[in-house]
Image (cartoon, rainbow, N blue to C red):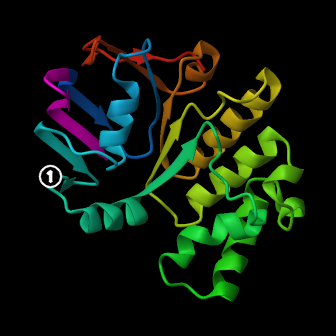
Amino acid sequence: MLRLAGVDKSYITGKNRLHVLKSVDLDIEAGEMVSIMGASGSGKSTLMNVVGLLDAYDAGTYHLDSILMKDLSETRAAIHRRNLIGFVFQSFNLIAFKTAAENVALPLYYKGIGRKTRLAAAREVLGRVGILDWAEHRPSEMSGGQQQRVAIARALVSKPKVLLADEPTGALDSTTSLEIMRLLQEVNAGGVTVVVVTHERDVAAMTRRIIRLKDGRVENADLELAHA
């Protein structure tokens, strides 16, 4: 599903060149649930941006769903993101003045789907993540865990093949974090490939594999098995 070979990524700031990803080789099969761990500055966020088609890479190859992702225009990258990838963020990124159902339906709006159909789809997914009763509430009326469930529902409404979760429990307490990770496990059991970026060992242990980054490289050739 995700295959990176010799991927490099650098950023130029003034006269300085910061080499962030260094010949990254990585394979994540369809239906896997893996976590990516590493210290601050190890390249986790950059790797997530490359995998999520939010940033281009400089060298190597990246295949997503057997399609080479290389030299994409903004329009083409957006199409692949819309069709293949769902995103979940630490800060939820919900629109404050919209209800939960309206937030979840937003990706379908960009696909040109009518309001009635997209809101019906949003309510169906909200039911799947256990928060249908809050469909007409706004984010300010919800707990952090409820907001993250809404964010997960929004990521799922377009039926992506890959779910990228960047520190999805970072703003939550330990009990709520456990609930969110169990929900992501259920999403994975439904056939969606799930990639979780985290610095929390307990979170990583709930995935099937742990991929460790250090100084822009995959630290170990044999990816570590999580003990979930």
Horizontal relation, residue 138 to residue 1: left or right: right
Residue 97 located within the stretch drawn in magenta: no
Residue at the spot 64% in from the left edge and 39% down from the top edge: 91
Residue at the spot 51% in from the left edge and 49% down from the top edge: 87
Kindly report the secondary structure that dominates the magenta region of the rendered protein: strand
Horizontal relation, residue 136 to residue 32: left or right: right
Which residue in the protein does label 1 denote? 70
Residue 111: percent from the left, percent from the top? Answer: 47, 78
Residue 211: percent from the left, percent from the top? Answer: 39, 21
- Judge by depth and name the residue closer to the eye, 89 or 207: 89
Relative to 57, does residue 23 appear above or below in the rendering? Answer: above
Residue 8 located within the stretch drawn in magenta: yes
Which of the 4 quarters of the picture holds residue 171? top right
Residue at the spot 30% in from the left edge and 41% down from the top edge: 50
Q: Which residues are magenta?
A: 1-18
Which of the 4 quarters of the picture holds residue 83? bottom left
